[in-house]
Amino acid sequence: MPVELMKGNTALAEAAVRAGVEAFFGYPITPQTELLEHMSKRMPELGRAFVQAESEVASINMVYGAACTGTRVMTSSSSPGISLMQEGFSYIACSEVPCVVVDVMRGGPGLGNIQPSQSDYFQVTRSAGHGDYHAIVLAPSSVQEAVDLMGDAFDLADQYRHLVFVVADGLLGQMMEPAELPPMQPLRTERPDWALTGANGRDPNIITSLELSAPALEAVNDRLQAKLKVIRETEQRSTENMTKDARLVVVGYGTAGRIAETAVKQARREGMQVGLFRPITLWPFPEQRLSALTDHVEALLVVEMNAGQMVEDVKLAAGGQIPVEFYGRTGGVVPVPEEIYDAIVESYEKLA
Amino acid sequence: MHEEVIFAGFGGQGVLFAGQLLAYTALAEDKHVTWIPSYGPEMRGGTANCTVVVSDEPVGSPVTKYPSIVVAFNNPSLEKYEDEVKPDGLLVVNESLVIHQVQRDDLDLVLVPATALATELGETRMTNMILFGAMLAHRPMVALDTAEHVLLDKLGERKAHLHELNLMALRKGMELGLAQKTEA
Amino acid sequence: MTSAVMVEEKVVYERPESLADVATHYCPGCTHGIAHRIVAEVLDELGVRDRTIGVSPVGCAVLAYKYFNTDGAEAAHGRAPAMATGIKRVMPDHVVFTYQGDGDLAAIGIAEIIHAATRGENITTIFVNNAIYGMTGGQMAPTTLIGQETTSSPGGRSQTLTGFPVRMAELMAGITGSAYIARRSLHNVKEINTAKRAIKTAFLAQLNGLGFSMVELLSTCPTNWKVSPAEALAWVESDMVPYYPLGDYKVAEEVKPLMKRR
């Protein structure tokens, strides 16, 4: 496939098409709308389902319905729309039907603005709906990685029958960058045995999140938690750069991660032993690798486009062994490398 | 080579397209590149700008506080970005639409009456290509030849009638830029 | 000693195949059971049981998926039409229906039902209107009548405080994408038979790809109305039917031949 200059939103959409998504349900919201627009053209021309729903509440429940039939299905939105979908996430997670949700995050709280942000970290990793569960959350930092992770998201969703988020921010969604798309995958014709396909020659299949008996619902939770434990143990992903001899490691994901990389390289040029750790899965958080780094690293500096959300996971992974500093911008302000560099210098000077 | 370029002006001046032309041309030459627009809620008439990072290395930050190149299409953009350009950076100014006097003396300053020249060419919308040509004359991040090929490709058949005019504008900008180039 | 006599018996009444062989949780005198049965009979008669997917609501019928012998899903409160949309769009050859009560459809889910109809979504909705929230213990519904006493409208529903009961069939009939919209009642045998015919028309509309169809069924809730089952049936006729007149509210031209065929 040729390398093309693609907008993040469009690349996410086309990558999903290539991954064999059979249905898209969504509602326009800036800064993810190009994704929905791309789908409105591509899905019908391929004979696949596309519905512009009346709200995000409806679109996630359409996703839930289509997911019950064992097809590859997705929606996309941005922060306020993701808030509206919380109810559906919870039903989907409990019912254990696979689906993919793209969140192109913007500044909040409230209506906020349409500028890039990472203010949904808690929303997607912690509280994606009521009840005890975590969704799988993937966080690309480039258009190419967005394309690659989109395919992985559908595979993970199917493998674990679980809800998978791909989280970008307004900058990654709007940015154009060269990327190579994968070849078109054929649509699956087989449906899993649990899917709603009509009780033809078998007992009826039922998909529900209702379990009125407390012990029975606890059993459902036990099964869910056992699955999440496996995911937590096997699916942690991260990447790092210049961490081997680093005294200070900067931790950032997505757009903040790549901006931090520029600042880290500047610090290296100035002779500071600084490295970068970039989580790719936000849940499961790559605690194993980060925890291992604390053996030789003297301090961590977390950089986020929010008031400090992932920093809590970083502190858990660090386990109180080394100091964890934080630098963040909120409200849709994108930090520039220079200010992250200044934060690095400040943290570095504190090292013994 | 690593350049961080901001194109800035009014919506409708072809600011975003100028940035895209640089991005597509950089890709055509197998360079690393990012393009990001700055966007507001309005669809028309507001300010428009975009940041393009072109590099021989993979691009880390796609945003910059201190661009190495600024192409200012109008007065507000010039006022906003003059102080931000890196020392020894390049500032290309659309002389036709500015009243602000540039104060910095540590920059490579190129003043081009782009809108007036474009109007002379018969199409005000060629302003962006004239400024683009002037920029390339001073910072040959990509070859003019590649830019011309990419430009015609992006304009496509639908805008075939504008092919010649765009090329003329691009070359005119390059010519004016070279004329203002002081040999080191 | 009496000798055995062979008597030839004729089956006059049996459980439809589309109805699961289980006891329901519905209260004595509740007409949900009748609604379930006539829907199941229609699915049997149309021969579509093995390609039908039902979507259950939140409310008294929350467990409906256990009572229909078809594939089924349980939706979030009010979202059954959205969920059914998702299912139908990827399974267009299947028969998809929602079964919803008045709180589910006419309050929290009114956006979803209206937009399913505006899209002309090719699904069928069975809307059970018993003028009260049954499962949560008898609170006011959007369809509670003026003056009707509930646990959240003590002293009777006041129009100055809470406005007016919503007439869903009339509302849905005004939507272009609706192919067939009817209101029926379950308060006596004649009306039950009429209701079954309407349900059959609604499913036939779907099978012919004609768009959205809905049958509103006036239903009883003796438990929360605090009356006997017999009194409840009488109240439907005396109080509900005058405010919620029975009849066909929207019959698209293409639907008319489907009604004549029988």
Image: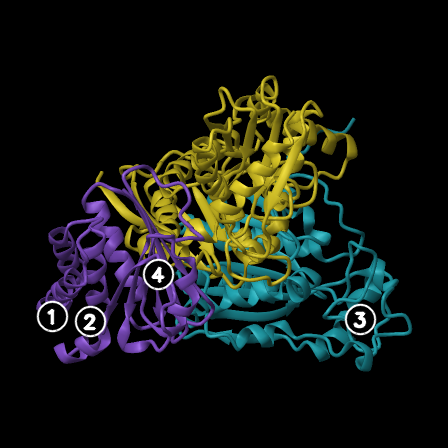
Chain colours: A yellow, B purple, C cyan
For the residues bearing labels 3 and 1, Cβ distance under 8 angstroms: no
Q: What residue type is labelled 3?
A: Trp
Please name which of the two marks, 4 or 3, marks the residue nearer to the observer: 4
One can see residue C19 in this view: no
Query: Mark 4 and mark 3: span between their CA atoms?
Result: 91 Å
Q: Residues within 10 Å of mark 1 (few under 14, many from 20)?
A: some
Mark 2 surroundings: few (<14), some (14-19) or many (≥20) residues within 10 A: many
Q: Mark 2 highlights which residue? A: B126
Distance from disc 4 to disc 2, alpha carbons, whole Å, reads: 29 Å
Q: Residue B105 carries which label?
A: 4
Q: What element carries label 3?
A: helix
Q: Which of marks 2 and 1 is nearer the N terminus?
A: 2
Q: Which label lies toward us, 1 or 4?
A: 4
Kindly identify the residue that appears in the image at 35 percent across and 71 percent down: B11
Spot occupied by residue A290 in the image (x, y as percentages of width and height) = 57, 25
Q: Which amino acid does label 2 sit on?
A: Met
Amino acid type indicated by mark 4: Asp
From the image, state whether disc 4 or disc 2 is nearer to you.
4
Q: Are marks 4 and 2 in contact (CB under 8 Å)?
A: no
Q: In which quarter of the image is residue B99?
A: bottom left
In the picture as drawn, the residue positioned furthest to the right comes out as C155
Asked if marks 2 and 1 touch (Cβ < 8 Å), the reply is yes
User: Are discs 1 and 4 less than 8 Å apart at CB?
Assistant: no
Q: Nearer the viewer, residue C97 or A79?
A: A79
The residue under label 3 is C235
| Residue behind mark 1 | B165
Q: Mark 1 falls on what kind of element?
A: helix
Q: Is residue B67 left or right of residue A78?
A: left
* Residues flagged by tags 2 and 3 on a common chain: no
Please state the chain letter of the residue tagged with numbered disc 2 in the rendered image: B
Measured as percent of width and height from the top left, residue C98 is found at: 57, 55
